[in-house]
Amino acid sequence: MMQPLGRKILYFVVLLIIPILLWIIAAPKIHYITFLLMFIFFLISRHWNVLRIFSETFEIILLFTVLNYLLSELGIDKFFPANNVIVIILLFVFLLIFKKSGRQKLFLLRGKTTGVLAISFLFAALSVASLAVWFLFQEQNPHAKFIPNVPLFFLIPLGIGFSILNAIYEEGIFRSILLSQFFDQLGFAWAIVLQAAWFSFLHFQSGFPSGIIGIGLTFVFGVMMGYLVFRTSGLLIPVLIHAVADFSIFILILLRMKEFI
């Protein structure tokens, strides 16, 4: 249900602050306080009509953050991207079965491909080019630690598999679950901006790309993918573009490891 402007602004501001506290500020105490405040806010929102706009969104965000925390405590995050696969499966089970959210609401459809191929190729090319430019200006290769020391004919399938799984995970979180939540409360434009902000803040500390420039690049990417979700009414094309971008990251890291760039 679309909300009055005042509630939209409140929702947008609060939901913009949360990822800053969780992902931009590298302070565990702040993270714990944020979790506690979110839980209290969630409980209040279930019983106070003015804040009811936050109830379902906070329920999902709390589940997402708690799942990631538990998997990290259990050490499963060391088997990346297995931890992400577990998180996205559990979240979709919760939403589709327990919350009765439809596939259409979550954009879990193939979507149309006619009439969007040109802009999709453009977005893919811009994404790969911007990643390459950013990477070439990095003096180090910190992400090389994630590449196992195995023969090349094993690495390429691993890179393809990682690219597909990570694309499904991140598009599932940001362009399916969060975008659908934000769209219900804010509408088209505000929802695209907010999910792109969440996506970009996640990359600030250790993403590819990272830092302030990384925030800018991933924000633009998030806006492009959010637009394509609405344009196609599905996740297929955004997932494919994201997988291509992720595989280009893998290739760039590999080329620097082999001292070709």
Image (spheres, rainbow, N blue to C red):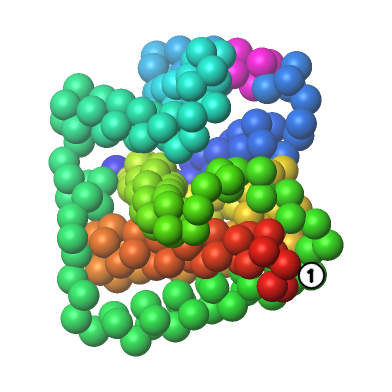
Q: Which quarter shows the C terminus?
A: bottom right
Left or right: residue 65 compared with residue 216: left
Rendered residue at 66%/43% (across/down): 145
* Residue at position x 61%, y 38% in the image: 19
Residue 226: image quadrant is: bottom left
Residue 97 horizontal/vertical position (percent): 16, 26
The quadrant of the image that shows the N terminus is top left
In the rendered image of this protein, does residue 49 appear above or below residue 200?
above
User: Is residue 78 found left or right of 135 in the rendered image?
Assistant: left
**Residue 46: which quarter of the image?**
top left
Residue 99 visible here: no
Between 42 and 1, the one nearer to me in the picture: 42
Magenta span contains residue 34: yes
Q: Local crowd at mark 1 within 10 Å, few (<14), some, or many (≥20)? A: few
Q: Is residue 61 left or right of residue 129?
A: left
- Please tell me whether mark 1 sits on a helix, a strand or a loop: loop
Q: Is residue 73 above or below residue 249?
A: above
Q: What amino acid type should be assigned to the residue bearing mark 1?
A: Phe
* Count of picture labels: 1
> What is the x, y in percent for residue 4?
43, 46
Residue at left offset 28%, top offset 58%: 235
Is 166 in the magenta? no
Q: Main secondary structure of the magenta part?
A: helix
* Span of residues in magenta: 32-37
Q: Position of residue 228 (x, y in %)?
A: 35, 68
Disc 1: which residue: 137
Q: Relative to the observer, which residue lies in front, 60 or 170? A: 170
